[in-house]
Amino acid sequence: MASITGYSEALFVAGAAIVTLVPRPASSFNWIGGDLAAPFRKSLLFLAAMNISRNVSFEDRRFREACPSPESSNSMIPNTGFWTVLYYVLTSIESFGLCFLMLLMPYLVQKRLSDVINIRPGHNLMPWLQAILTLNVLGTMTAPYNRNLWAFKRFGDALGCIPVIKTLQLFRRTNSSSAEQGNHLMIKTLEALEGYSFVITTMAAAAYLFDNHHSMVNVAIRLVSIFISWVRVIFHGHLLNAMDDASYIPPRPFGAKYDDEPTDPEVIDDGHQLVVPVTPVRVR
């Protein structure tokens, strides 16, 4: 790799996967953990492994113009045209997979909402997914010839924030379950994070499109946009884990009572019968 950026991203991604996958919801009955969150957790594990492998094996081509490093000759993969194209293809696949992962959370939330409102889970997410895929392919095909056109992919990443915000707002307005009330503050926090990510990723796309890759401000914006994507993964994963925990009802032993279940008012612990006075109701 040309700089420590790739190593830093690999370490950060590993940490994001650990803090998201290690806490297992109470409803975990499979190897990956979770019920509603299980597809998200499987996809995260695959993308994290792919990201770490790419950052370790390939030379980091994103910031070498602004931050040249003598380590570029230590790359495990030769710097030729074929490997350059392969690098951009793998990066685009990973980026699209990350956008798919970001849209997987609102799909799973809509799946939960379909139990209480009339909604087709994922129906309104398909146009966004198609637009993101188109921009990712366009960016991948043009970036090896003109790095400024990598902006198409970054615009696609920014688009992924919009359906997430809309789904979170729908969930917050619709859900009135007392078990889910504790997640509302987390949802509001996630809405703010998605809005910030949209602004930063759009600025990063503009930095690719109009900059000559030597401006430290634009390089910083592009760098933050990389890490903010994985911060979103952490919050999405924790929200799904919390929803799994809120919906989990532990098995009830025969004859046992829950702590909040009222006790029979006519029986007390010492075996005596409790006499409850009856007040007559006067009807006028």
Image (spheres, rainbow, N blue to C red):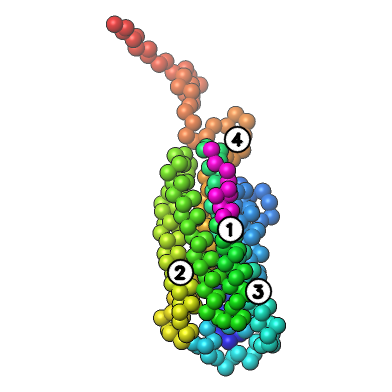
Mark 4 vs mark 1, CA separation in Å: 42 Å
Magenta span contains residue 108: no
Q: Residue at x 46, y 55 (%)?
A: 165
> Label 4 belongs to which residue?
252
Residue closer to the observer: 121 or 210: 210
Quarter occupied by the N terminus: bottom right
Label 2 or label 3, whichever comes before in sequence order = 3
For the residue marked with disc 4, what is the amino acid? Arg
Label 3 SS: helix
**Horizontal and vertical percent for residue 135?**
57, 67
Q: Which mark is residue 129?
A: 1
Label 3 or label 4, whichever comes before in sequence order = 3
Label 2 or label 1, whichever comes before in sequence order = 1
Which quadrant holds residue 143?
bottom right
Label 4 SS: loop
**Foreground disc of the pair 4, 2:** 2
Q: Is residue 17 left or right of residue 206?
A: right
Q: Residue furthest left?
A: 284
Label 1 SS: helix
> Label 3 belongs to which residue?
89
Mark 3 vs mark 4, CA separation in Å: 52 Å
**Foreground disc of the pair 3, 4:** 3
Which quadrant holds residue 13?
bottom right
For the residue marked with disc 3, what is the amino acid? Val
**Horizontal and vertical percent for residue 247?**
55, 43
Mark 4 vs mark 2, CA separation in Å: 51 Å
Label 2 SS: helix
> Label 2 belongs to which residue?
202
For the residue marked with disc 2, what is the amino acid? Thr
Q: Residue at x 45, y 22 (%)?
A: 265
Q: Residue at x 62, y 84 (%)?
A: 59
